[in-house]
Image (spheres, rainbow, N blue to C red):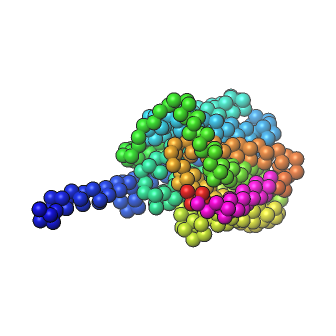
Amino acid sequence: MSPASTGASTIMGAATTVPAPDSRLTPGGPGYRRMSFALFLAGVATFALLYSTQALLPLISNGFGVSASDASWTVAAATGGLALFVLPMSALSERFGRRTVMTASLAVAVTVGLLVPFAPSLGVLVVLRGVQGAALAGLPASATAYLAEEVRPKALVTAIGLFVAGNSVGGMSGRVITGWVAQEWGWRIAVGVVGAIAVGCAIAFRLLLPAPRHFKAGSLHPRRLLGTVRDHLANPLLRRLYAIGALFMTVFGGVYTVIGYRLTEEPFSLPQGIIGSIFLVYLVGTVSASTAGRLVGRLGRRGALYLGGGTTAAGLLLSLADSLPLVLLGLVLITAGFFAGHAVASSAVSKTATHGRAQASALYQSAYYIGSSAGSTIGAMAFHASGWSGTVGVGLLAILGVVTITVLGSLAARRAPVAAHS
């Protein structure tokens, strides 16, 4: 009897050919909004804590009687701690789960954040900030790996863009709040307020984030971890993306570490509260990061990186003017270009990695925050030696590096088109 006459084989045949429905999250679907808001809050807490001292550096310099380059270590220690620990924390997330590691990381970071206001010396403050940065290392790589596993590929750039947007809101709100609070009550109360806000974000994050449904526990075996790292570093596209992330962050770290010093000096002489409000330009980064997916759709990844680099360079040049409106416009362009470039590069890492996504993201984050530490330190040194033009020069060199690497990527793609689409 034919299959059609019984119907049984037809059903079995259909069962073997119809793919299982994709249960990953998608915009408009159940759980997507909760997930997006939870990771948005995690991004807010991460950047608010990580850069809580950046807008306060002039006050910290005065309080401890140290130079701008010495005070900048309160930023560099936090970002450096994150850079050093992001890879080990990503390995823990492969074994114990993304949500578990992110929750533990936030818990430790907010606890240290409540201790920071009581630091008796610059040395103790730098150590506490280093510990805080190491704790926060569990967030960035685990978050992007969580999204790569739980969100459908077509929505991945948008989802990561929302997480990056949370970073921009955290960076903005932390700096604005600390600026005004510090003007009235000093830098210690200001960083304490940021710590309290981060506690609220951490609690909401844990309550809102959906339990992972597609996570598969991996091994903590060092050889396997090193093998995964070697695989990623052997991938030319990933190496280029890591370098691009580091260079973009070199610009951003340098500019926002030094800008407070510049605006307190002539011809601006702004008070601390107004300087803190300058960081409202981070809202531009929120928009540019969250629209990165559409930008890639129109221009392609390399086109979006060219646009981000060009926008950042234009902002650096504008910021050289001794006119406050032009400086503000320059900061807007720097912020927009940076966050767009960062969102494009970080989402490309998640798409490119075929295995060990947490390690691939961790290597990107490590390079990214090494760039932040280098930018804040070198930018402050350049400012001390040559003023704001020295800091801008460092930034322009970094953007030249971004453009050069992207051009080399385009040439490599033309020589090996198959590899370019892998």
Span shown in magenta: 394-418
Q: Quadrant of the N terminus?
A: bottom left
- For the point 41% across and 61% down, the residue is 27
Q: Is residue 73 left or right of residue 390?
A: left
- For the point 56% across and 63% down, the residue is 292
> Residue most toward the right?
386
Q: Position of residue 299 (x, y in %)?
A: 60, 69
Q: Position of residue 290 (x, y in %)?
A: 54, 61
Q: Is residue 396 magenta?
A: yes
Q: Is residue 336 visible?
A: no
Q: Is residue 227 left or right of residue 391?
A: left
- For the point 44% across and 45% down, the residue is 205
Would you say the magenta stretch is mainly helix, strand or loop? Answer: helix
In the picture shown, does residue 113 fall above or below 281? above
Q: Nearer the viewer, residue 5 or 400?
A: 5
- For the point 52% across and 59% down, the residue is 157
In the picture shown, does residue 219 fall above or below 231? above
In the picture shown, does residue 253 fall above or below 421? above
